[in-house]
Image (spheres, rainbow, N blue to C red):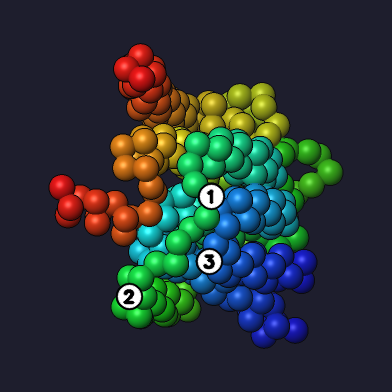
Amino acid sequence: MLINTVLMTLLAVVTIAIVRQRSLFGVVILASVYSFLMASVLVVLDAVDVAMTEASVGAGISTVLLLATLHLIKTTEIRSVRPHLMPLVISVGTGAILVWGTLVLPPFGTPDAVIHQHVAARYVADTIKDTGVPNVVTSVLADYRSYDTLGETTVIFTAGIGVMLLLHRARRRGRSNDGET
Amino acid sequence: METLATALGHYNYVITIFLMMIGLYIVVVRGNMVKKLVGLSIFQTSVYLLYIAPGKIIGGTAPIIDPAFKVYSNPLPHVLILTAIVVGVATLALGLALVVRINEAYGTIEEDEIFERDRET
């Protein structure tokens, strides 16, 4: 519980640093730090599979993608001239409403909360009998709810096609420009 | 002791919402598109916390069945968020590809400069 509180505070500090940082390299590295802190919080919250994915995808692949993009573009942010009072008011207002909404949530970590009374108990009780997989997250992901996973792979496939089309066009145009000069 | 536990549990939610709002603020205020995408990722990761935190049971362990343990945290939010993480990186990749294309077309990724160039033409 205490370690969780410390990690959450660190997360908040890193996020404020991300807002204030003007160098995009700094932003990317801080985003990577943020993902690792998030993975640590997830381990504390017993979500070990999610933590592993967050560490490899959030801190690994995302950072590589962002750095690859920075290789192709300018890496400092200009000081924006747009007004930021109104967005601040909206953010703080929405945040206040959301915090007010959390007041009625069940207390943290109680086993008799509504979320634990639904199908989750059945998954934990029957996973060995139904699937033979001791890791419940794996058995739900790949067995009980494998259609969700199929949908997820469709999304990744679509995004992959989109990225390929966008970057392929860019490269072809670059080549024709080379031909002209 | 109980009030302390309640306060710490509530602190989790407050920080989660704080991260969410910082992400929203970055997306709205910052004109730099890479920064916007990082803000979007922060918003997404804060949603992970919002889902995972209620699934935790104090005294429970990770949901991997073993005779040595009796109480397990709720596995269902973990599955949902695994999907969300992967979809999140897919959106990030697509967004970054768009940023690279915009940078080629306009020579900049600052929204203000792009609007200016659009007005000139």
Judging depth in this view, the residue of A50 and B33 nearest the camera is B33
Residue A176 falls left or right of residue B46: left
Which residue is identified by label 3?
Answer: A19
Q: From the image, which quarter does the C terminus of chain A lie in?
A: top left
Q: Callout 1: 10 Å neighbours few (<14), some, many (20+)?
A: some
Which residue: 72% across, 54% down?
Answer: A40
User: Looking at the picture, how far across and down is residue A99, in whole percent?
Assistant: 46, 77
Q: What's the amino acid at mark 1?
A: Thr
Which residue: 38% across, 59% down?
Answer: B31
Eye-nearest disc, 1 or 3: 1
The numbered disc on residue A83 is 2
The numbered disc on residue A75 is 1
Earlier sequence position, callout 3 versus callout 2: 3
Q: Which structural element holds mark 3?
A: helix
Q: Can residue A89 be seen in this view?
A: yes
User: Looking at the picture, how far across and down is residue A172, in whole percent?
Assistant: 36, 17
Judging depth in this view, the residue of A92 and A43 nearest the camera is A92
Q: Is the same chain shared between marks 1 and 3?
A: yes
Q: From the image, which quarter does the N terminus of chain A lie in?
A: bottom right
Q: How many marks?
A: 3
Q: Which structural element holds mark 1?
A: loop
Q: Is residue B63 visible?
A: no
